[in-house]
């Protein structure tokens, strides 16, 4: 990052935010309208942000204007794609659907949207997370990048934004008893899913849809079942990505153990062990590494113990807290969907020096700087496209020919690197066999099947990394 852009002051950020909040309800602190906006409304918000930046920061006017024009173009083209007046010119085999990981509170995943909305860069233009997210609410489903390295139609694809946001649950479930809020959320999710599937399947031609980040969650798509039940989606095949994630997780553990075979005292701790992907991780780890003692924790303690007790001839320990896992294991796998704040007093006495934390969640379950400050190492689960024709590598369609990496500070390191869920979508579509898709809670059989597809199509482990940067094991 250019040093001249670092240091947009907190006062400037506050001034930009306050200026916008005084200009209309799009910027106020109430629950936002998450339904799709019109093109004119989206472009109006961009104009307001540009004007607020120019009036309240010392950003160079020419630089702010150029960032505004690039952001304007992205929004304008996104509506063109959605309306069908702009096309890719080819019919695709697959679409990898991803939601927004960023939220209005933190900057952790801000960089995922900056390639498309450079005006919203907090460092260059003093735009807060609050303003960034409120500017983007209302986008239609759109193409973020393409996978067009192959001449074989079943190997082509697009990375598609499903405009669901991490803020939505926090905004709309603040009061679990508020039925109106819950109904509104259900309406928004249904509308967004229907729009996204129609866009990916009818506009782009994709018959295979991969689900990224939280999209497979039971409350959103029920492992894709809600998508397949939509009108017009009869020919659609969804795959959760969980088989590929667990398969690549096992390869990540194998690499860590190969490099540091005596470091972990023969133990591994698993956070979120009672979830769909977490329990499959427990079983896969026991099968792949029978020499390791496995201890798992889930906040649903009764379910965790019930699963452990029911495991035939498999010994699994159960912890009473996440802190207990972190204190007892130097090799930790996280399969949780929430973020752990290591500054919380619950972790004050936990020694994390030498801990290797493998995080299979997006958004991530822990901040890299928090873990590294305490002497630990954070690894994300990611694979690499080793195919001859590069059909799993993004082309940089919207980012000047440079593959979109999900954000310089919140994404992937290496232009052939892809999240394992995206790689699963690619190999399932390439196989042309709907039976290969993972369409429910992931099982060990699913993991084995996706592992074989990875081997067939040339998927292997990416360089060790997290938050867009390589990681060296100490």
Image (cartoon, helix red, strand yellow):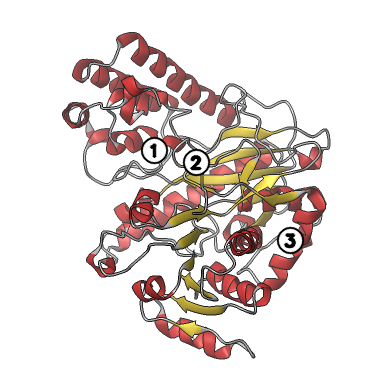
* Number of residues whose C-alpha sits closer than 10 Å to that of mark 3, classed few (under 14), some (14–19) or many (20 or more): many
Report how many numbered discs are placed on residues in the image: 3
Disc on the earlier residue, 2 or 3: 3
Return the residue at label 2.
Answer: 468
Q: Residue at x 21, y 28 (%)?
A: 9
Return the residue at label 1.
Answer: 110
Residue 249 at x, y percent in the picture = 60, 61
Q: Secondary structure at mark 3?
A: helix
Residue 451 disc label: 3
Q: Secondary structure at mark 2?
A: loop
Label 2 vs label 3, nearer the camera: 2
Front residue of 209 and 399? 399
Q: CA distance from mark 2 to mark 3?
A: 25 Å
Q: Is 362 placed left or right of 173 in the picture?
A: right
Q: CA distance from mark 2 to mark 1?
A: 12 Å
The answer to whether residue 184 shows anywhere in this view is: no
Question: Based on the displayed image, in which of its 4 quarters is residue 440 positioned?
Answer: bottom right
């Amino acid at each position: 990052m250019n040093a001249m852009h670092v240091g947009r002051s907190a006062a400037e950020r506050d001034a930009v935010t306050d200026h916008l909040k005084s200009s209309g309800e799009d910027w106020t602190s109430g629950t936002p309208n998450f339904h799709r906006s019109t093109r004119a409304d989206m472009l109006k918000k961009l104009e307001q942000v540009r004007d607020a930046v120019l009036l309240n920061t010392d950003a160079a006017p020419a630089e702010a204007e150029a960032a505004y024009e690039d952001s304007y173009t992205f929004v304008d083209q996104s509506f063109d794609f959605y309306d069908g007046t702009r096309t890719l010119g080819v019919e695709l085999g697959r679409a990898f659907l991803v939601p927004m990981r960023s939220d209005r509170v933190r900057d952790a995943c801000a960089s995922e949207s900056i390639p498309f909305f450079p005006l919203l860069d907090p460092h260059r233009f003093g735009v807060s997370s609050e303003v960034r997210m409120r500017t983007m609410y209302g986008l239609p489903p759109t193409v973020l990048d393409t996978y067009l390295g192959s001449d074989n139609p079943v190997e082509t694809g697009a990375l598609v934004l499903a405009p669901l946001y991490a803020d939505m649950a926090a905004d709309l479930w603040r009061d679990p008893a508020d039925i109106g809020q819950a109904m509104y959320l259900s309406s928004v999710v249904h509308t967004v899913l229907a729009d996204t599937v129609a866009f990916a399947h009818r506009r782009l031609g994709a018959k295979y849809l991969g689900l990224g980040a939280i999209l497979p969650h039971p409350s959103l798509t029920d492992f894709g079942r809600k998508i397949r039940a939509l009108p017009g989606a009869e020919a659609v095949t969804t795959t959760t990505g969980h088989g590929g994630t667990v398969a690549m997780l096992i390869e990540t553990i194998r690499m860590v153990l190969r490099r540091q075979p005596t470091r972990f005292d023969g133990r591994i701790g698993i956070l979120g062990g009672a979830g769909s992907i977490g329990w499959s991780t427990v079983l896969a780890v026991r099968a792949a590494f029978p020499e390791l003692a496995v201890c798992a924790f889930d906040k649903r303690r009764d379910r965790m113990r019930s699963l452990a007790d029911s495991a035939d001839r498999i010994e699994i320990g159960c912890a009473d807290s996440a802190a207990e896992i972190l204190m007892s294991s130097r090799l930790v796998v996280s399969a949780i969907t929430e973020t752990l704040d290591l500054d919380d007093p619950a972790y004050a006495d936990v020694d994390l020096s030498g801990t290797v934390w493998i995080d299979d969640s997006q958004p991530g379950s822990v901040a890299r700087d928090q873990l590294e400050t305490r002497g630990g190492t954070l690894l994300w689960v990611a694979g690499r496209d080793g195919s001859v024709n590069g059909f799993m590598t993004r082309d940089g369609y919207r980012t000047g020919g440079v593959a979109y990496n999900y954000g310089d500070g919140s994404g992937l390191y290496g232009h052939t690197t892809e999240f394992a869920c995206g790689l699963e979508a690619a190999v399932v579509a390439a196989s042309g066999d709907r039976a290969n898709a993972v369409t429910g809670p992931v099982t060990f059989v699913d993991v084995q099947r996706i592992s074989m597809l990875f081997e067939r199509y040339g998927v292997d482990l990416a360089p060790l990394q997290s938050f867009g940067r390589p990681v060296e094991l100490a």
